[in-house]
Amino acid sequence: MDKVYKNGDIDEELEHPQSMESETQKASIVASLEAVKHKSGKSHSEIGNETGLTNVYVAQLLKRQAQLKPETAPKLRAALPDLPDNLLQEMMKPPLRSYHPNLIQEPTVYRLNEAVMHFGESIKEIINEEFGDGIMSAIDFYCSVDKIKGVDGKDRVVLTFDGKYLPYTEQKTEHMASRSKQQEE
């Protein structure tokens, strides 16, 4: 089992930062962050409401899949008062965005992937009709999960993917900065 960091235990390892945290370090940090959340008794949505972040982004922060911005750190500290300084500082470093290869076997993740694959071609076609030849950014991107009642009164999951449209560019040599610099020389 991975080590779960307590207040101060992570200090020594964080004093010698590497360019990328190891998967073992990441797992230990995530376990510690999840323990802080669990101790708070709050949901991702509650923390999101207190910080002004989406519930999915809060989960991403706690999974070390997103970087905590300095201006948001005080809000997160207020929402999770037991969050130690060393973990807060770790959350402000660029994370190693990765996932375990077996994640696709988890039923919710599998079904989400299946839905995107099933509807993906149609979604792409509509994006092209509405916007032109381009894609939806996954960098300038917001995601949330909401619970609503369907017309039949049963609980329904609403996933919102809100990404910036990025058009493909026509690759003209006159627009290439590297080419224009060569011509100046």
Image: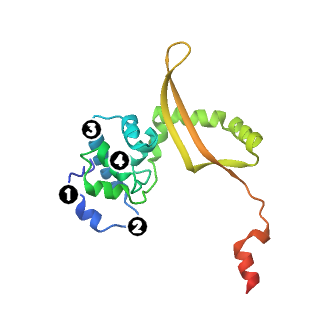
C-beta proximity under 8 Å, tags 2 and 1? no
Mark 2, other Cα within 10 Å: few <14 / some 14–19 / many ≥20: few
Q: Which mark is residue 8?
A: 1
Q: Please say which color scheme the image uses.
A: rainbow
Who comes first in sequence, dot 1 or dot 3?
1
- On screen, residue 136 versus residue 54, left or right, reads right
- Residue drawn at the location 33% of the way across and 58% of the way down: 90
Look at the numbered discs 1 and 4 and tell me whether their residues touch, using CB distance below 8 Å: no
Q: CA distance from mark 3 to mark 2?
A: 31 Å
Location of residue 113 by image quarter: top right
Write the residue at 54% across / 18% down. 150
Q: Position of residue 87 (x, y in %)?
A: 29, 54
Chain-order first, disc 4 or disc 3: 3
Tag 2 secondary structure: loop
Q: Which residue is mark 3?
A: 40
Check disc 2 and report the residue beneath it: 19
Spot occupied by residue 114 in the image (x, y as percentages of width and height): 58, 34
How busy is the neighbourhood of tag 4: few (under 14 within 10 Å), some, or many (20 plus)? Answer: some
Identify which amino acid the numbered label 4 is placed on.
Answer: Lys
Q: What is the tally of numbered marks visible in this picture?
A: 4
Mark identifier at residue 75: 4
Q: Toward the viewer: 91 or 79?
A: 79
Give the CA distance from mark 1 to mark 4: 22 Å
Provide residue 148's location: percent of width, then percent of height. Answer: 50, 23
Q: N-terminal of the two: label 3 or label 2?
A: 2
Q: Is residue 148 rendered to the left or right of residue 119?
A: left
Residue nearest the observer in this picture, 56 or 103: 56
- Say whether residue 63 is left or right of residue 144: left
